[in-house]
């Protein structure tokens, strides 16, 4: 009898979770998410394939009037790719900035304390020198 009561209580508690309506709804959501992820993977594969393939098989003819601009563009591209890693490193470190600032505040407080102690010691040394002169 106690077991039946526990089973009924469990059924009551899980009725909304195990109800076919809710299960069907959750199943539909999961299927939608699955199809979305499959589409993302297809797009990623297609993009990767497009990036790997050369855009053209032969060199493109460039008018002489644009050669100067092409040289400037290539210079900028080389500079950009050279600095890209450092810029990415900077962007990656942004979440750590609050921690770094906190550590700097602590270090600044310690330096201020040490400076006050140094001033006190300097005053004591000067007083001691005056006493030694007398």
Image (cartoon, rainbow, N blue to C red):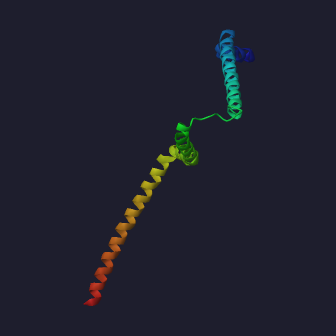
Q: Residue at x 74, y 18 (%)?
A: 3
Q: Residue at x 36, y 69 (%)?
A: 117
Q: Quadrant of residue 63?
A: top right
Front-lying residue, 22 or 81: 81
Q: Residue at x 29, y 89 (%)?
A: 132
Residue 42 in the image: state x and y as whole percent: 70, 24
Front-lying residue, 105 or 93: 93
Q: Is residue 75 visible?
A: yes
Q: Is residue 92 visible?
A: no
Residue 1 in the image: state x and y as whole percent: 74, 14
In the image, residue 18 above or below residue 77: above
Residue 103 in the image: state x and y as whole percent: 47, 54
Residue 78 in the image: state x and y as whole percent: 58, 46
Front-lying residue, 104 or 20: 104
Q: Residue at x 70, y 22 (%)?
A: 38
Q: Residue furthest bottom?
A: 134
């Amino acid at each position: 009898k106690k077991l039946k009561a526990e089973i009924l209580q469990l059924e009551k508690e899980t009725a909304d979770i195990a109800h076919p309506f809710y299960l069907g709804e959750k199943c539909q959501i999961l299927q939608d998410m699955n199809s979305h992820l499959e589409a993302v993977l297809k797009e990623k594969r297609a993009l990767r394939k497009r990036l790997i393939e050369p855009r053209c098989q032969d060199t493109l003819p460039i008018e002489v009037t644009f050669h100067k601009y092409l040289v400037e563009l290539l210079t900028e591209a080389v500079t950009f790719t050279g600095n890209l890693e450092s810029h990415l490193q900077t962007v990656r470190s942004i979440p750590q900035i609050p921690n770094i600032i906190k550590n700097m505040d602590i270090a600044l407080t310690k330096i201020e304390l040490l400076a006050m102690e140094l001033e006190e010691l300097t005053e004591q040394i000067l007083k001691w020198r005056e006493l030694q002169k007398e």
